Image (spheres, rainbow, N blue to C red):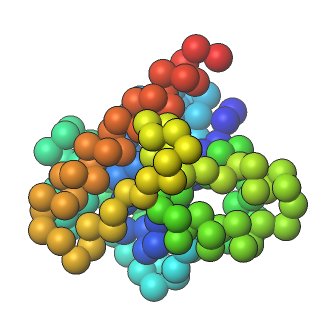
């Protein structure tokens, strides 16, 4: 089974959406998808209501997710770690102990903007429109990931 972790700052806006989107595109008997945050500020919380609403608008239910912080053991548990922005990327790499750990980490938007170091903007302080924009970016990246992995 391939295990994938989506990471953002608080694990209440972007990474829950990414988890829900990718989960909807891949066979659950072959892939395990989870999410985490670089901060423990919202540990145990539901995703942000706006993320829940946008996901619901696209037919996804992310209400069973709960925020949790990224821990070093996640490097051992997961095969791929997709981060939402360069700050998340640096925070996760700071915890990496081996090159193998570092090689598991990539920016999720590298799937649609290779080598451009593009970030998924944090919509937390924005309106619902910011969450919709984030959903569309993640939908596009997750579609590329699913298409690549379905071929292998």
Residue pictured at 35% horizontal, 52% vertical: 17
Q: Position of residue 119 (x, y in %)?
A: 42, 58
User: Looking at the image, is 128 positioned above or below residue 57?
Assistant: below
Q: Name the outermost residue toward the top.
A: 151
User: Looking at the image, is 40 positioned above or below residue 11?
Assistant: below
Inspect this view and state whether residue 4 appears: yes
User: Looking at the image, is 77 positioned above or below residue 148?
Assistant: below
Residue pictured at 27% horizontal, 73% vertical: 124
Q: Position of residue 151 (x, y in %)?
A: 58, 14
Nearest the eye: 145 or 72: 145
Q: Name the outermost residue toward the bottom.
A: 41
Q: Is residue 101 left or right of residue 6?
A: right
Residue pictured at 19% horizontal, 61% vertical: 130
Q: Is residue 120 left or right of residue 48?
A: right
Q: Name the outermost residue toward the front.
A: 116
Question: Which image quarter holds the N terminus?
Answer: top right
Question: Which image quarter holds the C terminus?
Answer: top right
Count of numbered circles in the view: 0
Which quadrant of the view contains residue 58?
top left
Q: Position of residue 131 (x, y in %)?
A: 21, 58
């Amino acid at each position: 089974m391939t295990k994938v972790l989506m990471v953002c700052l608080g694990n209440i806006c972007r990474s829950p959406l990414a988890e829900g989107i990718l989960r909807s595109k891949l066979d659950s008997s072959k892939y395990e998808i989870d999410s985490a945050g670089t901060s423990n500020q919202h540990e145990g919380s539901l995703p942000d209501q706006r993320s829940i609403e946008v996901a619901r608008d696209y037919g996804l239910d992310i209400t069973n997710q709960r925020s949790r912080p990224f821990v070093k053991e996640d490097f051992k548990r997961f095969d791929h770690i997709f981060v939402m922005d360069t700050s998340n990327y640096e925070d996760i790499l700071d915890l990496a102990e081996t090159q193998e750990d570092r090689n598991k980490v990539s920016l999720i938007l590298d799937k649609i903007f290779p080598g451009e170091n593009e970030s998924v903007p944090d919509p937390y302080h924005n309106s619902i429109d910011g969450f919709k924009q984030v959903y569309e970016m993640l939908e596009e990246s997750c579609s590329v990931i699913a298409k690549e992995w379905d071929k292998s």
